[in-house]
Image (cartoon, rainbow, N blue to C red):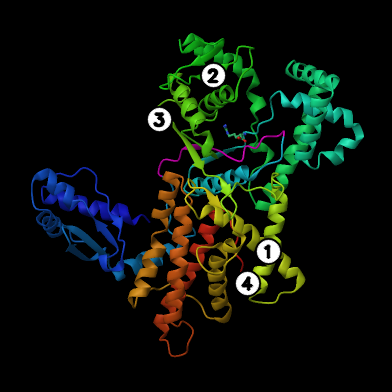
Amino acid sequence: MQIKAQLNQLIHDACAKAEIPVETVQVNEAGKPEFGDYQFNGAMPLAKKLGKNPRQIAQEIVEALPENPILSKAEIAGPGFINLTLSPKWLAARLEEAARDERLGVGRQSEPKRVVVDYSSPNMAKQMHVGHLRSTIIGDSLANLFAFLGDEVIRQNHIGDWGTQFGMLIAYLEELGEGAEGSLHDLEEFYKAAKKRFDEDAAFADKSREYVVKLQGGDVKCLHLWENFIDKSLGHCEEVYSKLHVRLTREDVKAESSYNDDLQKIVEDLQAKGLLKESRGAKVVFTDDEENPLIIQKSDGGFLYATTDLAAIRFRVKELGAKRISYVVDARQAGHFKQVFAVARMAGYAPEDVRLEHVSFGMMLDKSGRPFKTRDGGTVKLIDLLDEAVERAKGAITQREAYDEEELEKIAEIVGIGAVKYSDLSINRESNYIFDWDRMLSLEGNTSLYQQYAYARIRSIFRKYDGTIEGKVQLGDELERRLALKLLQLEDVLRAAAREAMPHYITGYLYDLATLFMKFYENNPILRSDVPEELRQSRLQLAKSTADTLKLALEILGIKVLERL
Ligand code: ARG
């Protein structure tokens, strides 16, 4: 259920009745409980436009509000704010409806569209790094979210599997022969060793260059070596995906190399459309930045990262039918995407009705604010990082309770991975992200463990209660009313998060919800024998709806919950 849209409509109707000209009405959630549940701040700008007193305008709007079951109060405050409070009766009835629905009352997009989410997209020559971790976590949660809201999601893992460095890597792979299996275990080391050979041995360097040419020419032996290398490298990534419970599979891989045959055609097409210019021997397209045109083909005939991205956009729009393409890539590539999108528009690869967005994210930093590295300055292996998360989770949860070995493994895995994901998703993705074990595994604050405890606590109520839940709600006090309202805000939150590609709206919501529930639970006993049956039923339903909501939203974010913790 979308609450804001209904309130906007009410205000809109009131304005029409009061003959106040208004285009769009946008109510906001109130900042403080004293200001009601929602606030309409539009009277002030309207008054300015009409040359009238804002309180007067607010008064006219409130008086013209149509008869409705939603609002229990509409008050004017300050210079002309309209504070809206929702009726407990109406909320109770809506909550009963939502509770009967497996989607908890969240509707599906009335016009589903194809959405491509380009995420993870690591480079095959090296180990996946923390930037790819962020892309994988954020991208997967967005793909889940879009799909839940009813869009047709196509996940694209645009892996970097092409380029001159592969000549060197396959030459080295061949040289190692049988011994290669073990060396491929650590791609970082493998790359370094190959590079060392390349720098030290001229014959090896020549061979590497020869292999690049052969590879590009489709030489069977070189292709075979290359495929073997990519397969191993992708295998490393899949280990990470599986540990993260991320749904990327080989089916979702659409590698850079798959666009190779399109690159020359892109050049010809841009040429035919009169967009291609010569600049210092290279073929370029000028966008609004006169100094930095987008290079399409280098003077030696080589293509670039951008050329492949143009081919990919064309493919995604024409072949996949995408209406929205979300690139979950770190902020440093902002300039690249700005130019690629501009050229894609100029060339007609992405018409105006296709939304192209760079879902950018900041760097992952350590606690002292430096780029996240190993102690000796190397790349942190993601597998090790995730294993450490699970180990540390054991420490965090055994502070509260003792578990037997097997149970501990299972729980720690869910808690540890959940913590890594949640902490990444809980901040505005555009800021840099400080990776802090203690904070992410804390039981207090906006953490996954806090939500998982809230969930498990509710489940334990239901283990103790052996009666039925009738699903009837009557909202007794203000805490209950606010909890019900929070529960019913789920759809508004999910939609806003999807619209702006901001998963932290959801984590913020979950934190508010869990906190509100804890307060409710401390003050409003459920199973105690002196609680009247009708009230108990209602409180049981509030608890159940809270658990269902926590579970659903966490699952959208890719985080599991536990029945017991
Ligand atoms: N492989 C690139 C990197 O690791 C990210 C690719 C992002 N997707 C894209 N279509 N350019 O930096």
555 in relation to 223, above or below: below
Residue matched to label 2 = 295
Separation of marks 4 and 1 at Cα, in angstroms: 19 Å
Helix, strand or loop: magenta stretch: loop
Q: Position of residue 269 (x, y in %)?
A: 52, 13
Q: Upstream in the sequence, badge 4 or badge 3?
A: 3
Q: Secondary structure at mark 1?
A: helix
Q: Is 479 left or right of 218, judged from the image as shown?
A: left
- 376 w.r.t. 164: above or below: below
Toward the bottom, the furthest residue is: 530
Kind of residue sitting beneath label 1: Arg
Q: Tell me where residue 275 appears, x and y as whole percent.
A: 46, 13
Tell which circle, 1 or 2, labels the residue nearer the N-terminal end: 2
Task: Provide the residue span drawn in magenta.
Answer: 110-125
- Which image quadrant for residue 185? top right
Kindly identify the amino acid type of the residue bearing the numbered disc 4. Arg
Disc 4 versus disc 3: distance between alpha carbons?
A: 47 Å
Which numbered circle lies on residue 353?
A: 3
- Asked whether residue 311 is drawn in magenta, I would say no
* Res. 411 in view: no
The residue that disc 4 covers is: 564
For badge 3, the amino acid type reads Asp
Quick one: 305 or 66, which is closer to the camera? 305
The Cα atoms of the two marked residues, 4 and 2, are separated by: 56 Å
